[in-house]
Image: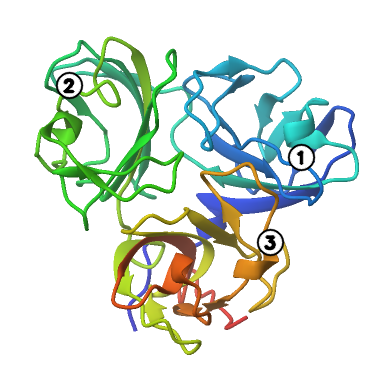
Amino acid sequence: MAYSTISKSSAYMNPKKYAGTGSEQSITGVGFQPDLSWIKNASSGSNYDHHLYDAIRGATKSLASNNSDAETTKATGLTAWGADGFTVGADVGVNSNGSTIISWNWKANGSGSSNGDGSITATVSANTASGFSMVKYTGDGSAATVGHGLGVAPKFVITKAVNDGRSWLTYNSIDGATKGTDLNSASAPSTSSAFWNDTAPTTSVVSLGGSVQTSGSYDYIMYCFAEIDGFSKIGSYTGNANAAGPFIYTGFKPAWVLIKSVSSTDWNMYDRDRLGYNNGNSCIFANLSNAEDSEYARIQLLSTGFKITTTNAQINNNNTEHVYMAFGQPIVSTNGDIATAR
């Protein structure tokens, strides 16, 4: 049996659910000091934006995956990170009284340092052990390259102009470097050489084609994800429109899963924390402000991957490719921990 090089996945990526109080509170139990915290008020009754905070841009600086708005300063949003979590103020998106809030947290390498691997000098915060990096750079409106710091080619990339209202853009290795998909919409992938200069990421740089979504005359934040055996998986599966849907082998027990059909469907997000048992994992849509939706609670998180158990076209459209990214606990890791099935 293969052993993951990561002994404890929750030291690098961990969901953390908490109850909103409406007053400043410290959220602990993440297991590390996060460098990216993606937070969503999941409770029904009201729609709240997603809130993405990262250590390069700094606390209180929020971006919303469900819209194209520029970065906003939330003085009562996420106000600080700590050794085991973060502190939130009274902002309803991250701490509405009585609400269930979910946070998804990744560890990079703090506020980052200068990286000159690409034609654009960037600030890069990279964790090579977990295959995750954050890149802050300024575009110049032309084709360029920017370093990512991972030492291996990322298979999933998310980028956003932080000081302009441009849509988020994603790259994945399945669709390839000729295409890009907006994170803040349900649109299918678009084809343009201006996105990634028709060039896949290398072990050192991500190529940019001069599009306003990737390298206009703006400041950008980029999140890069590489596969780590037994911890993260980026791939695709073909839907069958059957309630006995496909099983997707990842080699670990997923803690977080993102799924997007290559057709015009929403970005579906699942995690182990909000309910905690199979066929009860309600969906949150990355591109919508909607509360969690139990209608799409048809995914099983198992010890070696995940299984689709719905005919819904969002995640099981017949003969259609669905791209996914997942993180989780190794089946058997270097410290001997064994993942359970449920």
Callout 3 secondary element: loop
Q: Indicate left or right for 108 with 66 as reference.
A: left
For marks 1 and 2, give the CA distance: 40 Å
Which callout, 2 or 3, points at the residue further toward the start of the chain?
2
- Callout 1 touching callout 2 (CB < 8 Å): no
For marks 2 and 3, give the CA distance: 39 Å
Callout 1 secondary element: strand
Residue depth check, mark 1 versus mark 3: number of the one nearer the observer: 3
Amino acid at dot 1: Ile
Q: x, y percentage for residue 251?
A: 38, 75
Specify the quadrant of the image occupied by residue 259: bottom left
Q: Nearer the viewer, residue 218 or 262?
A: 262
Q: Is residue 113 above or below residue 168?
A: above
Q: Nearer the viewer, residue 108 or 159?
A: 159
Instruction: Indicate which disc residue 27 carries.
Output: 1
Q: Where is mark 2, residue-wise?
A: 210
